[in-house]
Image: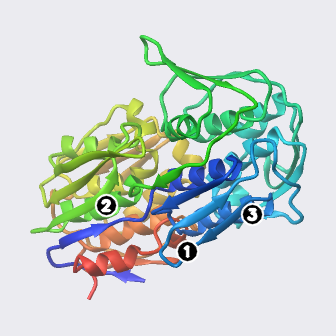
Amino acid sequence: MTFTAAPALSGSVAVPGDKSISHRSLMLSALAVGESRVEGLLEGEDVLATAAAMRAMGADIRRDDDGIWHIHGVGVGGLLQPQEALDMGNSGTSTRLLMGLVASHGITATFVGDASLSKRPMARVTEPLSRVGASFTASPGDRLPLTMTGACPAVPLDYVLPVASAQVKSAILLAGLNTPGITRVVEPIPTRDHSERMLKGFGADLEVEVQADGTRIITLKGEAELKPQNIVVPGDPSSAAFPMVAALLVPGSRVTIANVGLNATRAGLIDLLREMGGSIEIINAREVGGEPVGDLVVTASALNGVEPDPARAPSMIDEYPVAFVAAAFAHGRSIFRGLDELRVKESDRIATMATGLRAIGVTVEELEDGLIIEGSRGQPLPGGGPIATRLDHRIAMSFAVAGLVSRDGVTIDDMRPVATSFPTFTTLLQTLGAIA
């Protein structure tokens, strides 16, 4: 698909529900006793893979015609033996978090995924979960397909995270739900805290202590009893990133993005774009289901180069590809470092973005842990392609945004992976006037 120069973008849009919260809503509802209701669930392929897996392990999950999801849980400790392999598609979040759930249940599960997911290493999760007593038989390189058998009773874990990873933290906490005793996770660098917020909301006995240096110590009392909840999922800030950057870059644009989750552990991109000179106003700030939410009013702006603190990475790790696109149109040089985590996402996002940016006319230097990008001073880039997205949804959407401010358009090799997280992406661009 080719994305070409767009007229000024205008209008009000809403992005799909937050992917992180959607995954956790299904998992925790499936472990509660009784019926939970979830409104605004992201109905992308990744979250649907989680729903299918929880059904396979005993939960009753159905969707009404009005879009409300109803989940009747099996209770903590009640997961059933799945009769077939659990197909995770492209979803690393589903895979790693579900491994945490299975780790403290006496069942065996096999995880399979698509070509992209099957290249992603799982050792960062299998290593701590092995300590609770789970056993694993993985493909070479600790990759999928992978079969695991949980331990019941599992051994409570006291674990210091060696890398900043919300997925690893969440997997350990989920394993701790059905583990006797206290599970303790020490997080030297804070990551997104949806698991902690939602576990407390479902009634788990969980405490978070923040030390003077910012280290977070999370303790969870095992053999929990979760209570069903009514959940309203806010819009995903990672999805909002794409229309937000598009509105900043396309001259004359003014766009409102409604109902966006503004959790501080996820808001790094907004802070970065404002530092670059972007006009982003938050209106109607409120709290929904324990999560801060607001509407973003974004106005086209001249952006300046930036050198963000690597410590910001966990708060915008999924938004760096589109941040690189913003930097490509800035006045001056941008230097991004400390982004080793991008090497092991759906693709090697550092290498894939560097190659794609060069293909559309950007001067870019690839570093071991980031990129140096020379901005175009607000001038349209030549464009080009087809861009090899490596089955990575965020790479595809980032270059689609670049196409809206190019001279000759940007061609994407495959837009199908976008359905994993943002199935309404092209429809949203049409609503704003970007696509005829």
Q: Which residue is mark 2?
A: 362
Query: Residue 64, which numbered label?
Result: 1
Amino acid type indicated by mark 3: Arg
Question: Which quadrant does the N terminus fall into?
Answer: bottom left
In the rendered image, the vertical position of residue 309 relative to residue 408, given as above or below: above
**Image location (x, y in percent) of residue 68:** 51, 68
Which comes before the other along the chain, label 1 or label 2?
A: 1
Comparing labels 3 and 2, the label whose residue is closer to the camera: 3
Q: Which residue is mark 3?
A: 55
Does dot 2 land on a helix, a strand or a loop?
loop
In the rendered image, the vertical position of residue 333 relative to residue 388, given as above or below: above
| Residue 278 seen anywhere in this rendered image of the structure | yes
Question: Which quadrant does the C terminus fall into?
Answer: bottom left
The residue positioned 53% from the left and 38% from the top of the image is 201
The residue positioned 14% from the left and 68% from the top of the image is 253
**Image location (x, y in percent) of residue 280:** 18, 51
Q: Residue furthest top?
A: 212
Q: How many residues crowd mark 2 within 10 Å: few (<14), some (14–19), many (20+)?
A: many
Which comes before the other along the chain, label 3 or label 2?
A: 3
Amino acid type indicated by mark 1: Asp
Specify the quadrant of the image occupied by residue 101: top right
**Alpha carbon distance from label 1 to label 2:** 47 Å
Specify the quadrant of the image occupied by residue 3: bottom left
Tell me: 106 left or right of 351: right
Comparing labels 1 and 2, the label whose residue is closer to the camera: 1
**Alpha carbon distance from label 1 to label 3:** 16 Å
Q: Residue furthest front?
A: 34
Tell me: 383 left or right of 161: left
Q: Of residues 323 and 424, which is closer to you in this image?
A: 424
**Image location (x, y in percent) of residue 208:** 52, 22
The residue positioned 37% from the left and 82% from the top of the image is 2
